[in-house]
Amino acid sequence: MPGPRILIVGGGYVGMYTALRLQRRLRRDEASVTVIGSQAYMTYQPFLPEAAAGNLEPRHMVVPLRRELDKCEVLTGTVTEIRHADRQVTFRPDEGPERAVGYDVLVVAPGSIAKTLPIPGLAECGIGFRTVAEAVYLRNQVLSRLDLAASTDDEAVRRRALSFVFIGGGYAGIEAIAELQDMARDALRSFKGVAPDDMSWTMVEATERILPEVSLDMAEYTVRQLERSGIKVRLKTKVTSLEGGIVQLDDGTSFPADTVVWTAGVRPNPLLERSDLPLDGVKRVQCDAQLRVAGVESAWSAGDCAAVPDVTKGEGAMCGPTAQHAVRQAKQLADNIVATLRGREATTYRHAYAGSVASLGLHRGVAEIYGIKLRGLPAWWMHRTYHVARLPTTNRKLRVLADWTLALFFRREIVSLGSFADPRRDFERAATGG
């Protein structure tokens, strides 16, 4: 008889790493594994800034699920509801009717989505920075704005095109603005009539500091490095409106900008609110220290969407929503599922936070690992070394290393393929006689 069916909801860090470990550890016919993801690939998000800046080929930072999970069933689409009492989820493929998918063991790992605020104009003017598509779009957007500025005599259009605003001073925002500004300054060597000082790069952070994951002195060092490169860092400042492409701040400042990037945090996937699983006050799945869903049989969770106790920090502490925890939790979760299938006890998840690394552009970075603080080139090297080591599969590691090696000898490409945003535009014009 076939073994129990393990259903993994989510194809991100937790979903892919859990499935990868399960297919390696499970014996033949011991259990079947099905993965449902919104995309047919897993994105290694720490490399998004480098992909946006042209240091990496975007395809090299994504892992195709069907190729790597060759012993699993992979479904691409959306889970719209979880009914664990019935051991079923409602699955909606990209096209066609919804259907019920049954299971015996559930792994809930849909991850998180951007945490937005009701700011007028944000939905119309802003863009996030969590997917490959957004990274490629931002690269094209920045380069197309440089093209426009170099081609127009209208000072107002030029000023608006050369204004770039990033909202949110966490790792995603800091790395994104640093890498894209570095790319833009490099690209300007090929643009006549546009100087680096003509560009305006602004980081807006509502709290009194950036990078809450590192010590205060390292955060202050990062601010100094950003400002030295020409980025204005505005702390304790909020955006009140983006209507009409006009950025309005709560201190009364306003200015036009064609590019507004939202990196101000994440929240658990709203799918969890359409389930019968226990949630905490911020809508995460409540878990015990073994990564089981609290008080629920045959259900497990980890990553951004899970409230997992951090046993290394004492009573009441929870693991942060970081890739560092997600990857390790996924492996522990898979091991615990295998252990319970074989009648053994699950093991407590235990990982002391190792630290953080961040890139501040080419050859610049900041890192704090096990209390050791690194700055500049050593931190940048540590950032690359750490993340290429964590990137799944040898195939992807070698491709990323090849990209970096070629970048030592050749300048990055500065072509804006703007038609990617609307690839049918030219054909529609031809077909309609436009």
Image: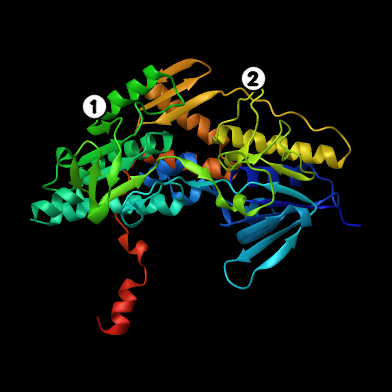
Residue 228 image label: 1
What residue occupies the far front of the structure in this picture? 281
Distance (Cα) linking label 2 and label 1: 40 Å
Residue 402 shown left or right of residue 324 in the figure:
left
> Residue 297: where, in percent of width, then height?
80, 44
Q: Is residue 44 visible?
A: no
In the image, taking residue 381 as reference, residue 301 lies left or right, namely: right
Q: Residue flagged by tag 2: what amino acid is it?
A: Gly
Q: Which of 58/213 is in front?
A: 213
On the picture, is 356 further left or further right than 366? right
Q: Would you say residue 200 is visible in this rendering?
A: yes
Q: In which quarter of the image is the C terminus?
A: bottom left
Foreground residue among 372 and 223 = 223
Please name whichever residue, 112 or 56, is drawn nearer the observer in this view of the structure: 112
Write the residue at 48% across / 52% down: 59
Element assignment for label 2 = loop
Residue that extends furthest to the right in the rendered view of this protein: 1
Write down the residue under mark 2: 314
What x and y, as percent, mark residue 298?
79, 45
Front in this rendered view, residue 153 or 102: 102
Give the image's coloring scheme. Answer: rainbow
Whole-percent x, y for residue 43 in the image: 53, 47
